Amino acid sequence: MNPKYIYNVIVAAGSGSRFGASLPKQFCILEDRPVLMHTIENMQKALPGSHIILVLNPDFFEYWDEICRKYGFYSPKIVAGGNNRWQSVKNAISQIPHDAEIITIHDGARPIVDKAMVCRVINALDNGFGAIPVVPITDSLRQLNKSGSMPVNRELYRAVQTPQAFHASKLREAYTLPYDSSFTDDASVMSAAGYDDLLIVDGDSYNIKITHPLDIEIASIYLRYK
Ligand code: C5P
């Protein structure tokens, strides 16, 4: 696949309300610079020659500009985010040229994104129109019900990560559906559009999504280890 037809959307327009800091988690400092700069750089390294589109909340456009100057960081093209992840991705897709063949979507809050894993996801697209990285569940699982909860077989479940990659035409079509609150990622949007047989590839347990303040400490250990 010629990388010039691959467009990588990095969604970073969330407020990070679970993180509980004054700045959204994607701007917090991880080792030497903000989380988001690691994410962008690692995606660039994973797929050299491909395009990156960064989705930010317009309230942070000026701040991003400021920190890019401070860290001497060259920003990719920026698109304004929406009120939820789905809207942010939709806005980005609307800015992607029509000659795009593959669109990947990656959470800005996952800075430890690894080249080998990204290549597994992209290469899987030779055999299908969508590929997603997953990892096994290590905790035991219970399903909540009216009378309490019941155990479920964790072997039947996987945790889903990003980047997720899709043939551009299929993703564009899925994103014409109206919003549903069950859309927590792009695979769920594709499933709602009837594209259920997405290819599952091995994710990476280091590819954590920064969610709580302690995750920054964990990510810095992972960064040094990688
Ligand atoms: O909230 P959650 O951690 O699931 O968000 C996943 C990713 O989606 C984050 O990188 C976040 O910045 C992004 N997002 C976005 N626009 C929103 C909400 C979340 O780009 N309105």
Image (cartoon, rainbow, N blue to C red):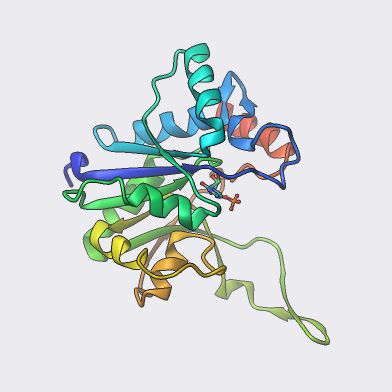
Decide if residue 226 is in sight here: no
- Residue 8 in the image: above or below residue 40: below
Q: Is residue 102 or residue 64 the one in the foreground? A: 64
Decide if residue 15 is in sight here: yes
Q: Is residue 137 or residue 186 the one in the foreground? A: 186
Where is residue 10, by image quadrant? top left
Q: Position of residue 106 (x, y in %)?
A: 44, 46
**Which residue is drawn at the image coordinates 72% and 68% (left, top)?**
140
- Residue 39 in the image: above or below residue 13: above
Count of numbered marks? 0
Residue at the farthest right position: 147
Q: Position of residue 24 (x, y in %)?
A: 64, 36
Q: Position of residue 27 (x, y in %)?
A: 60, 30
- Residue 224 in the image: above or below residue 110: above
Where is residue 136, by image quadrant? bottom right
Side of 212 relative to 40 (left or right) = right
- Residue 100 in the image: above or below residue 147: above
Side of 138 relative to 187 (left or right) = right
**Which residue is drawn at the image coordinates 37% and 45% (left, top)?**
118
